Amino acid sequence: MDDVSDPTNERFFRAGFADLPLMAILRRFDRQRTLELCTRAWDHGIPMVEIPVQSPDAVAALTAATRAGAERGASVGAGTVTTIERVEAAAKAGAAFTVAPGFSRRVAEASIAAGMPHLPGVATASEIQRAMELGLTWLKAFPAAELGTSWFRAMHGPFPEVSFVATGGMSTGNAERFLAEGASAVSLGSALADAGQLAALPELVDRVRGAR
């Protein structure tokens, strides 16, 4: 199969980040805390939430969040989807999309076949090309903080059609810099586990909105 994605994959992420290019990653929180942080993210206008599925408890939290998101019109996706089994768990939990730390053709094909747009992780030009062979043009740049802002400028040269979601080491302190240097969106993960970062989130949202 040369191109497993139809335009739905492109449209999904473009629409999801259209109003605000930020995504919340909620890792290793219990079900109740996951729902609390989902609600806070949605209240601040962040409609895209990713919940990594690395344990049965995480899948349960994802299931609860997808149900709550449906009531809010928000998209909740499954993260760290590295196997076909996790694709199946994400689909059963009602995930709207999947995210992976790296690129796997099998995982990408399985996710899209199950009706879930896929955001694979990339860090090299070769990985970008392999993802593009499947028609995937929204890609997760990981680990973004280690790659640095210059990576985004460099990769946009040969791949101007690709939209990168900066992930890994992102915070309320550096998100705007990565957006300014070429990231199409930023995923805030560990920052949301920090009370100070969480308190700074509303101001970040206001600044990012003001800069668009």
Image (tube, rainbow, N blue to C red):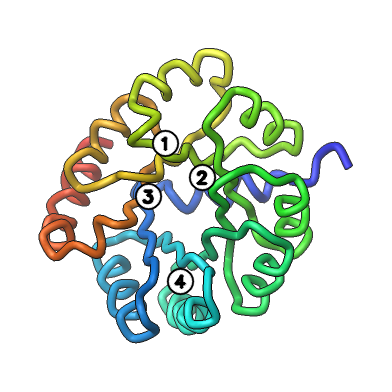
Q: Amino acid at mark 1?
A: Ser
Real-space Cα distance between discs 2 and 4?
16 Å
* Residue at x-position 58% and y-position 48%: 119
Q: Which residue is mark 2?
A: 14
Q: Is residue 12 left or right of residue 51?
A: right
Q: Quadrant of residue 59?
A: bottom right
Q: Quadrant of residue 85?
A: bottom right
Residue lying farthest right?
A: 1
Q: Position of residue 180 (x, y in %)?
A: 29, 28
Q: Amino acid at mark 3?
A: Ser
Nearer mark to the viewer, of 3 and 1: 3
Q: Position of residue 52 (x, y in %)?
A: 49, 65
Could you say which disc has been placed on residue 73 in the image? 4
Q: Position of residue 41 (x, y in %)?
A: 29, 66
* Residue at x-position 77% and y-position 51%: 106
Real-space Cα distance between discs 3 and 2?
14 Å
Q: Which residue is mark 1?
A: 184
Q: Is residue 165 left or right of residue 209?
A: right
Mark 3–mark 1 CB contact (< 8 Å): no
Q: Which residue is mark 3?
A: 187
Q: Amino acid at mark 4?
A: Gly
Real-space Cα distance between discs 1 and 2?
9 Å
Mark 1–mark 2 CB contact (< 8 Å): no
Q: Amino acid at mark 2?
A: Arg
Mark 4–mark 1 CB contact (< 8 Å): no
